[in-house]
Image: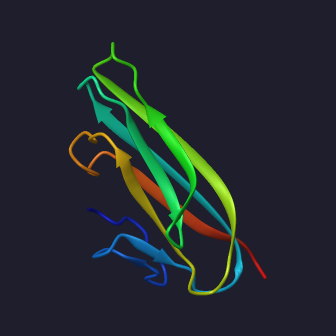
């Protein structure tokens, strides 16, 4: 993994989990790439262990395919968010995927 920006160090690289430093509205988005392997991928954004949104890629006739999604979440202090590969395989693991999150409005 490579972390480009992690102000406040609230994203833990070892566990790939973001922990909210305060209550507020947060924006999250992710983009993933699958290889041509005749299978569908499903990636979910998890909040405190529960799926909130998912993205799917499953076209059988392309070499590579991308899937993306994004959401605004109300989070309490210490809430946790991470991505979970529910089904399939990603190209190069998570190497060609991105995950972004930031505080939009503190409460």
Q: Residue placed at 48% from the left, 52% from the top?
A: 44
User: Percent x, y for residue 94?
Assistant: 29, 51
Residue 40, quarter of picture: top left
Q: Residue at x 27, y 23 (%)?
A: 38
Q: Quadrant of residue 21?
A: bottom right
Colour scheme: rainbow
| Nearer to me, 93 or 52 | 52
Residue 76 against residue 60 in the figure, above or below: below
Q: Quadrant of the image for the N terminus?
A: bottom left
Left-right relation of 6 to 106: left
Percent from the top left, x then y, of residue 23? 70, 83
Q: Residue furthest right?
A: 107
Q: Image check: 65 left or right of 29?
A: left
Q: How many marks?
A: 0
* Along the viewing direction, whichever of 25 and 59 lies nearer the viewer: 59
The residue sitting at 32% across, 74% down in the picture is 15
Q: Is residue 53 above or below residue 62?
A: below
The quarter in which the C terminus is drawn is bottom right
Residue 34 drawn at (x, y percent): 31, 35
Q: Measuring 51% from the left and 62% from the top, which residue is drawn there?
A: 46
Residue 21 against residue 55 in the figure, above or below: below
In the picture, measured across the screen, residue 39 lies left or right of residue 43, that is left
């Amino acid at each position: 993994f490579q972390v480009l920006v992690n102000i406040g160090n609230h994203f833990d690289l070892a566990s790939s989990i973001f922990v909210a430093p305060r209550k507020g509205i947060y924006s999250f988005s992710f983009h993933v790439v699958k290889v041509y392997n005749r299978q569908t991928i499903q990636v979910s954004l998890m909040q405190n262990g529960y799926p909130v949104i998912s993205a799917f890629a499953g076209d059988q006739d392309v070499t590579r395919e991308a899937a993306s999604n994004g959401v605004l979440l109300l989070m309490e202090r210490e809430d946790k968010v991470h991505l979970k590969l529910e089904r399939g395989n990603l190209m190069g693991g998570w190497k060609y995927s991105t995950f972004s999150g930031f505080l939009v409005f503190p409460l």
